[in-house]
Image (cartoon, rainbow, N blue to C red):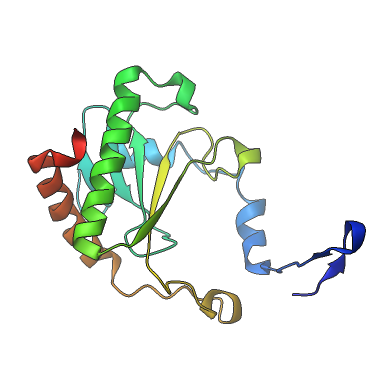
Amino acid sequence: MKPESGPEGSTLNRLWATWRMQYVTTLDKSPGGCVFCEIARAEDGPENLIVHRGRSCYVVLNLYPYNNGHAMVIPLRHVPSLAELTDDERLEMMKLVSAMQVALEEELRAQGFNLGMNLGRAGGAGIPEHLHLHIVPRWMGDTNFMPVVGETKVLPESLENTYARLRRALARVLERGDALK
Protein backbone atom coordinates (compact mmCIF):
# COMPACT_ATOMS: atom_id res chain seq x y z
CA MET A 1 0.00 0.00 0.00
CA LYS A 2 1.25 3.42 -0.88
CA PRO A 3 -0.14 6.38 1.09
CA GLU A 4 -1.15 9.40 -0.97
CA SER A 5 -1.72 12.92 0.26
CA GLY A 6 -5.36 13.69 0.91
CA PRO A 7 -7.26 16.74 2.08
CA GLU A 8 -5.75 18.64 5.01
CA GLY A 9 -2.70 16.41 5.29
CA SER A 10 -4.57 13.10 5.70
CA THR A 11 -3.34 10.03 3.85
CA LEU A 12 -5.28 7.61 1.70
CA ASN A 13 -4.00 4.06 1.43
CA ARG A 14 -4.68 2.10 -1.73
CA LEU A 15 -4.70 -1.67 -1.87
CA TRP A 16 -4.32 -2.98 -5.38
CA ALA A 17 -6.43 -6.13 -5.83
CA THR A 18 -5.72 -6.67 -9.52
CA TRP A 19 -7.17 -10.18 -9.60
CA ARG A 20 -10.67 -8.63 -9.23
CA MET A 21 -10.57 -6.86 -12.61
CA GLN A 22 -11.68 -9.95 -14.54
CA TYR A 23 -14.70 -10.32 -12.24
CA VAL A 24 -15.62 -6.63 -12.31
CA THR A 25 -15.45 -6.36 -16.11
CA THR A 26 -17.68 -9.40 -16.70
CA LEU A 27 -20.50 -8.55 -14.29
CA ASP A 28 -22.88 -7.46 -17.04
CA LYS A 29 -22.13 -10.48 -19.22
CA SER A 30 -24.26 -13.11 -17.44
CA PRO A 31 -24.63 -16.10 -19.80
CA GLY A 32 -28.15 -16.98 -18.76
CA GLY A 33 -30.82 -16.27 -16.23
CA CYS A 34 -30.59 -15.46 -12.57
CA VAL A 35 -28.23 -17.76 -10.68
CA PHE A 36 -30.38 -17.53 -7.52
CA CYS A 37 -33.51 -18.56 -9.44
CA GLU A 38 -31.58 -21.44 -11.03
CA ILE A 39 -30.37 -22.62 -7.62
CA ALA A 40 -33.90 -22.44 -6.23
CA ARG A 41 -35.26 -24.61 -9.08
CA ALA A 42 -32.75 -27.40 -8.38
CA GLU A 43 -33.30 -30.17 -5.87
CA ASP A 44 -31.87 -29.40 -2.44
CA GLY A 45 -28.54 -31.00 -1.75
CA PRO A 46 -24.79 -30.53 -1.64
CA GLU A 47 -24.73 -29.77 -5.39
CA ASN A 48 -26.64 -26.49 -4.95
CA LEU A 49 -25.70 -25.89 -1.28
CA ILE A 50 -29.30 -25.17 -0.15
CA VAL A 51 -29.23 -25.66 3.60
CA HIS A 52 -32.96 -25.01 4.10
CA ARG A 53 -35.96 -24.13 1.97
CA GLY A 54 -38.82 -22.21 3.57
CA ARG A 55 -42.19 -21.11 2.23
CA SER A 56 -40.89 -17.95 0.58
CA CYS A 57 -37.10 -17.89 1.17
CA TYR A 58 -34.21 -20.31 1.20
CA VAL A 59 -30.81 -20.48 2.92
CA VAL A 60 -27.80 -21.35 0.79
CA LEU A 61 -24.08 -21.48 1.48
CA ASN A 62 -22.01 -19.07 -0.57
CA LEU A 63 -19.98 -20.93 -3.17
CA TYR A 64 -17.23 -18.28 -2.80
CA PRO A 65 -17.29 -17.66 0.96
CA TYR A 66 -15.55 -14.87 2.82
CA ASN A 67 -15.40 -17.19 5.83
CA ASN A 68 -16.35 -20.76 6.61
CA GLY A 69 -20.14 -20.94 6.98
CA HIS A 70 -20.85 -17.82 4.88
CA ALA A 71 -24.53 -18.19 3.97
CA MET A 72 -27.21 -16.16 2.24
CA VAL A 73 -30.95 -15.93 2.81
CA ILE A 74 -32.68 -15.41 -0.53
CA PRO A 75 -36.35 -14.93 -1.42
CA LEU A 76 -37.66 -17.56 -3.81
CA ARG A 77 -39.37 -14.79 -5.73
CA HIS A 78 -37.15 -12.81 -8.10
CA VAL A 79 -37.15 -9.28 -6.62
CA PRO A 80 -34.35 -6.70 -6.45
CA SER A 81 -35.31 -4.77 -3.31
CA LEU A 82 -36.66 -5.01 0.21
CA ALA A 83 -39.54 -2.73 -0.77
CA GLU A 84 -40.82 -5.33 -3.22
CA LEU A 85 -41.03 -8.12 -0.64
CA THR A 86 -44.33 -8.94 0.98
CA ASP A 87 -44.59 -8.71 4.76
CA ASP A 88 -44.55 -12.53 4.94
CA GLU A 89 -41.38 -12.71 2.83
CA ARG A 90 -39.61 -10.09 4.97
CA LEU A 91 -40.66 -11.86 8.16
CA GLU A 92 -39.48 -15.26 6.95
CA MET A 93 -36.20 -13.78 5.71
CA MET A 94 -35.40 -12.31 9.12
CA LYS A 95 -36.53 -15.45 10.97
CA LEU A 96 -34.19 -17.53 8.81
CA VAL A 97 -31.35 -15.07 9.42
CA SER A 98 -31.95 -15.43 13.18
CA ALA A 99 -32.11 -19.22 12.99
CA MET A 100 -28.97 -19.40 10.86
CA GLN A 101 -27.12 -17.17 13.30
CA VAL A 102 -28.01 -19.56 16.14
CA ALA A 103 -27.02 -22.57 14.03
CA LEU A 104 -23.64 -21.00 13.23
CA GLU A 105 -23.05 -20.17 16.89
CA GLU A 106 -23.91 -23.69 18.00
CA GLU A 107 -22.28 -25.70 15.23
CA LEU A 108 -19.25 -23.62 14.21
CA ARG A 109 -18.88 -21.67 17.47
CA ALA A 110 -19.05 -18.34 15.61
CA GLN A 111 -18.17 -15.45 17.91
CA GLY A 112 -19.62 -12.62 15.82
CA PHE A 113 -21.31 -11.89 12.50
CA ASN A 114 -21.39 -9.53 9.58
CA LEU A 115 -24.91 -9.32 8.15
CA GLY A 116 -25.64 -7.33 5.07
CA MET A 117 -27.22 -6.61 1.73
CA ASN A 118 -25.67 -4.81 -1.19
CA LEU A 119 -28.56 -3.18 -3.02
CA GLY A 120 -28.06 -2.19 -6.65
CA ARG A 121 -24.92 -2.38 -8.78
CA ALA A 122 -23.62 0.92 -7.34
CA GLY A 123 -24.23 -0.46 -3.83
CA GLY A 124 -21.86 -3.34 -4.53
CA ALA A 125 -24.35 -6.07 -5.41
CA GLY A 126 -22.80 -8.78 -7.56
CA ILE A 127 -26.29 -9.97 -8.45
CA PRO A 128 -28.41 -6.82 -8.13
CA GLU A 129 -31.55 -8.21 -9.73
CA HIS A 130 -32.23 -10.75 -6.95
CA LEU A 131 -32.21 -9.61 -3.32
CA HIS A 132 -30.08 -11.63 -0.90
CA LEU A 133 -28.85 -11.16 2.65
CA HIS A 134 -25.35 -12.33 3.59
CA ILE A 135 -24.58 -13.95 6.95
CA VAL A 136 -20.82 -14.08 7.49
CA PRO A 137 -19.69 -15.74 10.72
CA ARG A 138 -16.62 -14.28 12.40
CA TRP A 139 -14.08 -15.44 14.97
CA MET A 140 -11.40 -13.58 16.85
CA GLY A 141 -8.26 -13.78 14.72
CA ASP A 142 -10.02 -14.94 11.54
CA THR A 143 -8.25 -12.35 9.40
CA ASN A 144 -4.62 -12.59 8.46
CA PHE A 145 -2.12 -11.69 5.76
CA MET A 146 -2.90 -14.58 3.37
CA PRO A 147 -5.53 -12.87 1.16
CA VAL A 148 -3.30 -9.83 0.65
CA VAL A 149 0.13 -11.40 0.38
CA GLY A 150 -0.72 -14.86 -0.91
CA GLU A 151 -3.93 -14.03 -2.80
CA THR A 152 -5.41 -16.96 -0.86
CA LYS A 153 -8.29 -17.18 1.61
CA VAL A 154 -7.70 -19.92 4.15
CA LEU A 155 -10.88 -21.84 5.01
CA PRO A 156 -10.50 -24.48 7.74
CA GLU A 157 -13.13 -26.94 6.46
CA SER A 158 -14.39 -28.16 3.09
CA LEU A 159 -17.61 -26.67 1.73
CA GLU A 160 -19.14 -30.15 1.64
CA ASN A 161 -18.49 -30.78 5.36
CA THR A 162 -19.70 -27.32 6.32
CA TYR A 163 -22.87 -27.88 4.26
CA ALA A 164 -23.66 -31.18 6.00
CA ARG A 165 -23.03 -29.77 9.47
CA LEU A 166 -25.04 -26.58 8.94
CA ARG A 167 -27.96 -28.36 7.26
CA ARG A 168 -28.33 -30.54 10.37
CA ALA A 169 -27.74 -27.65 12.77
CA LEU A 170 -30.27 -25.36 11.10
CA ALA A 171 -32.87 -28.15 11.04
CA ARG A 172 -32.37 -28.59 14.82
CA VAL A 173 -32.71 -24.86 15.49
CA LEU A 174 -35.84 -24.57 13.32
CA GLU A 175 -37.37 -27.66 14.96
CA ARG A 176 -36.80 -26.18 18.44
CA GLY A 177 -38.24 -22.85 17.29
CA ASP A 178 -36.37 -20.89 19.95
CA ALA A 179 -34.67 -18.60 17.45
CA LEU A 180 -37.95 -17.70 15.81
CA LYS A 181 -39.89 -16.16 18.70
Query: Compared with residue 154, is residue 94 higher up or lower down, i.e. above or below?
Result: above
Q: Tell me residue 76's x, y (percent).
A: 32, 30
Q: Tell me residue 172's x, y (percent).
A: 10, 48
Seen at 45% across and 26% down, the residue is: 79
Seen at 26% across and 35% down, the residue is: 95
Residue 109: quarter of image:
bottom left
- Front-most of residues 49 and 102: 102
Does the rendering let one see residue 17? Answer: yes
Does the rendering let one see residue 41? Answer: no
Residue 122: quarter of image:
top right
Question: Is residue 144 shown left or right of residue 120?
Answer: left
- Front-most of residues 3 and 167: 3
Question: Is residue 56 shown left or right of residue 115?
Answer: left
**Quadrant placement of the C terminus:** top left
Seen at 68% across and 68% down, the residue is: 18
Seen at 40% across and 64% down, the residue is: 67
Q: Tell me residue 159's x, y (percent).
A: 29, 65
Which residue sits furthest front?
A: 8
